[in-house]
Amino acid sequence: MCTVVVLHRPGHAWPVLIGANRDEMRTRPWSPPGRHWPDRPAVVAGRDDLAGGTWMGVNDRGLVATVLNRFGTLGPAAGKRSRGDLPLLALDQGSAARAAHALTALPGIDYRPFNMLLADRDGAWWVTHRDGDAAHGHPEAAPVPPGLSMLTAHDLNDGQGSARIARFLPLFRAAPVPDPDSGDWAAWQALLGRRDPAPGAAPGEAMTMALDNGFGTVCSALVALPQAPESPPLWRFAPGPADRAAWDSVALAA
């Protein structure tokens, strides 16, 4: 169960801040963010080396796209396209609103259920596809409201369905806001690395996890989107759990 946290601050010099953990089988091969797709030279994203797609990327227009599985839908399924293709399709667009519109036109039956977070300097969109067997269904999209929101394998800010959201959303909302200008992401970085689920919750509901079956948190990201169109986004990346891996900046200049 991956996690994405997004803070939307309309009118701020850094109107959108994003924190994310990717949870996956730890033996699944992947490559850190880069320009891995010759047919998409404007895209910087991590690459799933097994299926060829991505879980999170940024394009040169300042659009961020990330995909998460819905609850109970881990892994591929016969006759379905890889959900890792979806961020690449979104990053072909010039804005989060256009990407959301494009994704809602896709035939839902082609994919297993998913959540997506799309963001640019104007705000963020949540795209969800709940029923991968609906022959006539399509993904749905809704704007993310101003303030801080969290997305896991459940609905946006669903503290009833997600013990992770119930525990950590209030902690993120109460934490000091990162300062991209000074490089201070300490509070969010610490929260992304927390390994303590709520009392009584399953170990997999911690923010960072490592389960006995080999599933766990394999990388983390922190992204800041500037209001100024001429300024590039900032992306900090940890090639492992946030509390143990070394963080570094991702090169986004074209």
Image (cartoon, helix red, strand yellow):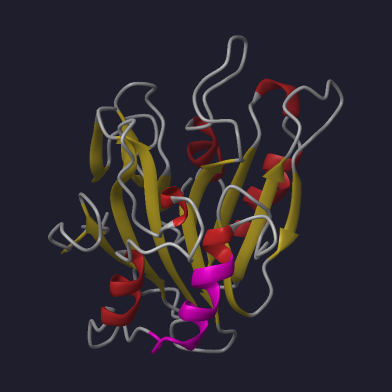
**Depicted 172 relative to depicted 65: above or below:** below
**Depicted 236 relative to depicted 55: above or below:** below
Please name whichever residue, 40 or 14, is drawn nearer the observer in this view of the structure.
14
Q: Position of residue 224 (x, y in %)?
A: 38, 72
**Depicted 91 relative to depicted 122: above or below:** above
Q: Residue at x 23, y 88 (%)?
A: 182
Residue 94 visible, this angle? no
Q: Residue at x 60, y 58 (%)?
A: 96
Please name whichever residue, 187 or 248, is drawn nearer the observer in this view of the structure.
187
**Depicted 21 relative to depicted 80: above or below:** below
Q: Is residue 8 left or right of residue 24?
A: right
Please tell me how many numbered marks the rendered image carries: 0
Q: Position of residue 87 (x, y in %)?
A: 50, 41
Asked whether residue 132 is drawn in magenta, I would say no
The residue lying furthest to the right in this view is: 136
Q: Is residue 87 left or right of residue 189?
A: right
Please name whichever residue, 145 or 106, is drawn nearer the observer in this view of the structure.
145
* Residue range of the region highlighted in magenta in the rendering: 166-177
Secondary structure predominantly adopted by residues drawn in magenta: helix
Residue 186 visible, this angle? yes
Q: Quadrant of the C terminus?
A: bottom left
Q: Residue at x 48, y 45 (%)?
A: 1
The residue lying furthest to the top in this view is: 78
Asked whether residue 171 is drawn in magenta, I would say yes
Q: Position of residue 58 (x, y in %)?
A: 40, 53
